[in-house]
Image: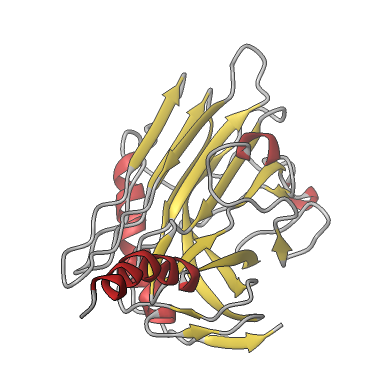
């Protein structure tokens, strides 16, 4: 092979590889498990961004939701849509969901926020990694736990975040990669197509002691690459600003527990949410 031809290969092949790499963007819309302050139950994030970091805190007031109510855990159903112009093929093993919890707006306290990244998927048969756990507890009278969802094979674990300030609190766990794989493994989403996923995130506990408290949460799927495509999911965030009018006189919503067993009940609740048998189906459609 002539030296000049080898030179062309060395110079041009990396450029060709770069030109054939693609980036895809997925959006999240919540279609179950929450109620907007306007009564809506299908809620897109009007300020979608590409991760739970950065300017998320300034976005948490939009959209506004009513408070979560017992029983817990509450499963969040999400519609994930391909809003890019390239096909997205999902692998058979997936990362876990990243989650965010946040409490702000309380007199005498600064905003407290926790972000827990979902664990990465393992490639070439390697095991997935654990999701992160992030927890802040300040002036709470009850125990509040942050709980990650487990790793399964090459699927990553979901993150677990909990924030509690002066008895205003929220604990959230992201779905594991194994939970997502039921819906997404080896699925191709063409541009404009979507799939609905029950249990994309789980609200494990929620309580409000001060009507001024703003209690926020959010989730996304960590960026990963497969089939020559870098796949990014725009984060979804929202804030609970108060109870629904017809339950405004009810006490703060907490799981029914014996004194001193709050954390144990959360663990059991999550185990039940992740372990109970479900009827899964993939809802695939084009917007």
Quadrant that contains the C terminus: bottom right
Q: Position of residue 16 (x, y in %)?
A: 43, 72
Residue furthest top in the image: 108
Q: Position of residue 131 (x, y in %)?
A: 31, 50
In front of the other: 37 or 114: 114
In front of the other: 188 or 259: 188
Decide if residue 142 is in sight here.
no
Q: Residue at x 57, y 87 (%)?
A: 284
Residue furthest left in the image: 126
Residue furthest right in the image: 38
70 to the left or right of 2: right
Coloration mode: secondary structure
Q: Position of residue 174 (x, y in %)?
A: 42, 56
Decide if residue 257 is in sight here.
yes
Using the image, determine if residue 77 lies above or below residue 97. Answer: below
In front of the other: 118 or 198: 118
Q: Residue at x 33, y 64 (%)?
A: 272
| Number of numbered callouts drawn | 0
Quadrant that contains the N terminus: bottom left
64 to the left or right of 68: right
Q: Quadrant of residue 243?
A: top right
Q: Quadrant of residue 116?
A: top left
Using the image, determine if residue 155 lies above or below residue 107. Answer: below
215 to the left or right of 40: left
Using the image, determine if residue 261 lies above or below residue 24. Answer: above
In front of the other: 107 or 200: 200
Q: Position of residue 85 (x, y in %)?
A: 63, 76
125 to the left or right of 69: left
């Amino acid at each position: 092979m002539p030296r000049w031809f080898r030179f062309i290969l060395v110079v041009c092949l990396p450029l060709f590889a770069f030109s054939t790499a693609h980036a895809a963007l997925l959006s999240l819309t919540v279609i179950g498990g929450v109620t907007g302050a306007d009564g809506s139950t299908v809620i897109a994030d009007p300020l979608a961004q590409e991760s739970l970091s950065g300017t998320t805190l300034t976005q948490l007031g939009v959209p506004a939701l009513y408070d979560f109510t017992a029983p817990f855990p509450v499963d969040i159903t999400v519609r994930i849509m391909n809003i890019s112009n390239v096909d997205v093929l999902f692998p058979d093993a997936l990362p876990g969901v990243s989650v965010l919890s946040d409490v702000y707006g309380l007199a005498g306290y600064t905003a407290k926020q926790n972000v827990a990244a979902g664990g990465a998927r393992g490639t070439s048969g390697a095991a997935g990694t654990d999701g992160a756990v992030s927890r802040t507890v300040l002036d709470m009278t009850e125990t509040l736990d942050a709980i990650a969802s487990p790793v399964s094979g090459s699927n990553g674990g979901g993150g677990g975040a909990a924030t509690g300030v002066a008895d205003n609190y929220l604990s959230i766990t992201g779905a594991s990669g194994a939970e997502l794989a039921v819906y997404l493994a080896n699925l191709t989403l063409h541009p404009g197509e979507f799939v609905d996923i029950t249990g994309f995130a789980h609200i494990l506990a929620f309580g409000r002691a001060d009507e001024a408290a703003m209690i926020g949460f959010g989730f996304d799927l960590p960026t990963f690459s497969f089939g020559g495509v870098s796949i990014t999911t725009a984060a979804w965030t929202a804030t609970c600003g108060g109870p629904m009018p017809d339950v405004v006189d009810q006490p703060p919503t907490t799981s029914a527990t014996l004194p001193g067993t709050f954390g144990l009940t959360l663990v059991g609740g999550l185990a039940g949410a992740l372990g109970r048998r479900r009827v899964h189906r993939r809802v695939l459609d084009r917007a």
